Image (cartoon, coloured by chain):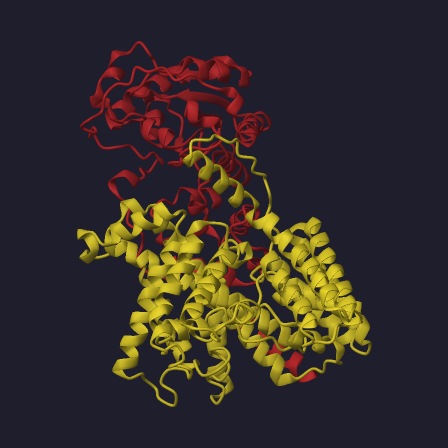
């Protein structure tokens, strides 16, 4: 028995030492990424006046460069494509932990899918995985059940097969991130795009409580950090859902901070400003960004 | 509790230390510890179903004693039937109740009568098919006077609930396992080390082979109408390795864990994908179940003693029952039926016992004839697995129809290079170890410690790196 236990201990010790060599792969994992925004956040490099947070509608519909130019306030876009409100709340929490709090936060609202239990919006674990060398991110991966507690001790528990790839990931045209964090879409419209006049009735009984909680946490974080919180509704190539909007008003304390696109602006009925039903292209984003900067400029103290 | 979970990684060393250091001098205490540990292991999943195991154990323990006392054959038969009805009653209720109700309703609606289905929302207790068969074998063996009934209740509880093999086998016979609880176990270094190697190989099979194949098999089977014929073939092959890695991996971990506690369980898989005909495959696949059906169903039905018609009937019965044992779905029954059909030519030509020895004994490579035979057997097995994996018969048929379409010769869209490399290396290692009880039993044993341990470390790295979320073992559901 003694011999057996000694052999097991010796083997475990050797394994423990060899395991540490794998830190090399963990350390270089962020270098392969083309979207460095979250890493900049973790390194405290995002000290801006205005921060935009949202899903793809935030990343595509607001040009942070133009907003900065028009408001004279340093602006950065931290919207992540296909991210849900829980991920957006995590991004904000991380931003506030490592950076100076912004003066204003623009939370881009997805409309009907915002609080739906199932949909096309996710907690973007894939954006966290390359940043596992940061303890804060790694702890979040453990919280989310993506890694187990032993990965705190063993490097091998943190890495995955993709970490062994040496070439940097290539960003497609749709994934290109500007210096200010926006991911504007090229002026190119889907050929069969048609304006959808159907009005979607919103059913609040179906809302996901965890998503609502994340939304309230964003409101709370802004309040305690003295951040002006704006809610932006970008245009769609389909009818505006008044029933969702009415529900949304009940969730917001200060209704003067809601920026809804100009529904009477006929340009938003022209398909040349859209890439698809839910996303503006670069030209459309410029129009909507001007609306936001006008709103902010008018509300400047 | 899953073998591939953090919980088990803590549970096993704790039980091991208590077993060898605290209770070693008292056999009864050691057995009681095994019972307690087994109940914790099972209760981790759902403690309420422990009552089923305990009830089943008490019934069979008492019936065993009564069978021994009772001299009258009619009374003994009655006692045996009580045991069969209790055990199969539980199994039938939890596993097959909804299946039978649904099929009755469908049968009646076929004749124009409409009946409201009265199905229940039943959870299938994990491992019920395995421990039911294990306890049944005890009562039947006592009834046939092949085994003296045990008077030691704790040992009997330990035999029924022994945690390494409780939820997914191997299905042990009382004649092999029960006597091991009566004797003081001694720790053997070589046995324990070999047990560790077998656990390691089992984890590799489960996490690296089965779970990775599952990703692609699920993707392809769940969207089968979207893929080309060649991709569907890949899907069926991935499932073939998934089910083997999953189930034989579990058996390896179970046998390896038992060895750490001084127990010897029977080999459950003997490299079945190197079989040269379907009869050999069934001698090598899920051996504990096949031999159970042989001893407790096939032989009592007359086995091969009668004429050719009886042989055919009995073969069909055991294959169909074996299919049905796997699940309450027609797909499993068709899978069993298909295997019976594969078996028929061998049975009718009396060639079903041709390949008893493992392929290419004392040779590094197989002959061309063996290669072709293995390839044919593997291909028909892959084909049968389609029914096993499909959601329904209709799904299986449409899957097969799509395979034999014009897209059969296209390059498959789903072809993960890393997994194909892993599968190739896996099969090479299995080939090298095919004469042993598990692939790592003698592999690299004569090499230096650096090479041997280096290899084990590589296996651990692969397991850890590829272990995402804990995946349930497929056979837990059976």
Q: Is residue A66 above or below residue B206?
A: above
Residue drawn at point x = 52 percent, y = 44 percent: B100
Q: Chain B colour?
A: yellow
Does residue A22 show up? no
**Numbered-mark total:** 0
Q: Nearer the viewer, residue B314 or B206?
A: B314
Q: Quadrant of the N terminus of chain B?
A: bottom right
Q: Is residue B113 left or right of residue B30?
A: left
Task: State the quadrant of the C terminus of chain B.
Answer: bottom right
Q: Position of residue B147 (x, y in %)?
A: 70, 76
Task: State the hue of chain A.
Answer: red
From this viewpoint, is residue B259 visible? yes
Q: Nearer the viewer, residue A161 or B338?
A: B338
Front-most of A8 and B136?
B136
A132 shown above or below A102? below
Observer-nearest of A202 and B353: B353
Residue visible at 40% across and 73% down in the picture: B279
Q: Is residue B216 left or right of residue B51?
A: left
Q: Quadrant of residue B160?
A: bottom right
Q: Would residue A239 be found to the left or right of residue A202 on screen?
A: left
What percent of the width, then of the height, locates residue A93?
53, 36
Residue B344: where, in percent of width, then height?
36, 69
Q: Is residue B462 above or below residue B474?
A: below
Residue B64 position, x and y percent, is: 74, 67
């Amino acid at each position: 028995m003694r011999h057996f236990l000694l052999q097991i201990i010796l083997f475990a010790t050797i394994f423990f030492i060899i395991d540490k060599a794998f830190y090399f792969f963990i350390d270089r994992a962020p270098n392969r990424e083309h979207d460095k925004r979250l890493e900049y956040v973790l390194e405290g490099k995002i000290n801006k006046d205005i921060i935009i947070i949202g899903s793809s509608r935030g990343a595509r519909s607001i040009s942070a460069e133009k907003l900065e130019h028009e408001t004279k306030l340093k602006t950065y876009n931290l919207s992540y494509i296909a991210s849900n409100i829980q991920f957006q709340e995590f991004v904000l929490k991380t931003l506030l932990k490592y950076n100076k709090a912004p003066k204003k936060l623009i939370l881009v609202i997805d409309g009907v899918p915002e609080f739906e239990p199932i949909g096309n919006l996710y907690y973007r674990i894939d954006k966290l995985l390359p940043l596992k060398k940061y303890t804060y991110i790694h702890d979040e991966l453990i919280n989310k059940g993506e890694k187990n507690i032993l990965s705190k001790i063993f490097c091998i528990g943190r890495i995955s097969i993709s970490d062994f790839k040496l070439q940097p990931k290539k960003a497609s045209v749709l994934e290109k991130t500007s210096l200010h964090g926006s991911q504007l879409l090229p002026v190119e419209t889907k050929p069969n795009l048609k304006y959808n006049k159907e009005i979607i009735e919103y059913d609040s009984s179906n809302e996901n409580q965890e998503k609502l909680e994340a939304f309230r946490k964003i409101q709370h974080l802004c309040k305690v950090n003295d951040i002006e919180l704006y809610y932006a509704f970008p245009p769609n190539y389909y009818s505006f859902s008044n029933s969702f909007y009415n529900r949304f008003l009940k969730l917001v304390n200060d209704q003067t901070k809601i920026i809804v696109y100009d529904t009477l602006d006929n340009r938003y009925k022209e398909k040349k400003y859209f890439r698809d039903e839910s996303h503006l292209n670069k030209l459309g984003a410029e129009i909507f960004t001007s609306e936001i900067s006008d709103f902010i400029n008018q509300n400047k103290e | 509790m899953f073998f591939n979970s953090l919980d088990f990684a803590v549970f096993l060393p704790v039980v091991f230390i208590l077993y060898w250091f605290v209770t070693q001098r008292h056999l009864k205490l050691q057995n009681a510890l095994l019972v307690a540990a087994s109940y914790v292991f099972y209760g981790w999943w759902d403690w309420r179903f422990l009552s089923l195991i305990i009830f089943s154990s008490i019934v069979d323990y008492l019936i065993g004693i009564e069978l021994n006392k009772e001299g009258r054959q009619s009374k003994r038969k009655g006692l045996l039937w009580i045991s069969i009805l209790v055990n199969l009653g539980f199994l039938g209720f939890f596993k097959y109740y909804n299946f039978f109700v649904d099929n009755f309703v469908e049968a009646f609606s076929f004749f124009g009568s409409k009946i409201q289905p009265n199905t229940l929302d039943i959870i299938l207790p994990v491992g019920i098919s395995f421990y039911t068969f294990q306890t049944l074998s005890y009562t039947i063996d006592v009834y046939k006077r092949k085994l003296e009934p045990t008077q030691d209740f704790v040992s009997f509880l330990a035999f029924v609930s022994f945690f390494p093999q409780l939820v997914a086998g191997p299905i042990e016979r009382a004649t092999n396992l029960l006597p091991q609880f009566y004797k003081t176990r001694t720790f053997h270094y070589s046995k324990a080390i070999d047990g560790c190697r077998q656990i390691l190989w089992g984890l590799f099979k489960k996490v690296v082979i089965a779970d990775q194949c599952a990703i692609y098999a699920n993707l392809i089977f769940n969207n089968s109408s979207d893929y080309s014929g060649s991709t569907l073939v890949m899907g069926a092959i991935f499932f073939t390795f998934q089910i083997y890695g999953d189930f034989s991996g579990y058996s390896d971990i179970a046998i390896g864990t038992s060895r750490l506690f001084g127990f010897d369980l029977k080999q459950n898989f003997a490299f079945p994908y190197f079989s040269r005909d379907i009869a050999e495959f069934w001698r090598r696949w899920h051996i504990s179940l096949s031999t159970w059906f042989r001893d407790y169903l096939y032989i009592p039905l007359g086995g091969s003693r009668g004429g050719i018609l009886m042989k055919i009937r009995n073969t069909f019965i055991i294959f169909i029952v074996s299919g049905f044992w796997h699940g309450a779905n027609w797909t499993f029954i068709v899978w069993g039926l298909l295997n019976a059909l594969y078996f028929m030519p061998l049975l009718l030509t009396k060639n079903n016992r041709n390949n008893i020895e493992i392929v290419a004994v004392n040779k590094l490579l197989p002959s061309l004839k063996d290669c072709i035979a293995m390839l044919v057997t593997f291909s028909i097995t892959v084909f049968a697995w389609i029914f096993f994996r499909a959601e329904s018969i209709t799904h299986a048929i449409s899957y097969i129809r799509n395979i034999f379409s014009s897209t059969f010769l296209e390059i498959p869209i789903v072809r993960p290079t890393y997994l194909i490399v892993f599968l190739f290396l896996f099969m090479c290692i299995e080939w090298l170890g095919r004469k042993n009880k598990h692939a790592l039993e003698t592999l690299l044993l004569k090499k230096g410690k650096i090479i041997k341990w280096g290899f084990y470390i590589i296996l651990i790295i692969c397991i850890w790196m590829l272990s995402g979320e804990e995946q349930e073992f497929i056979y837990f559901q059976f």
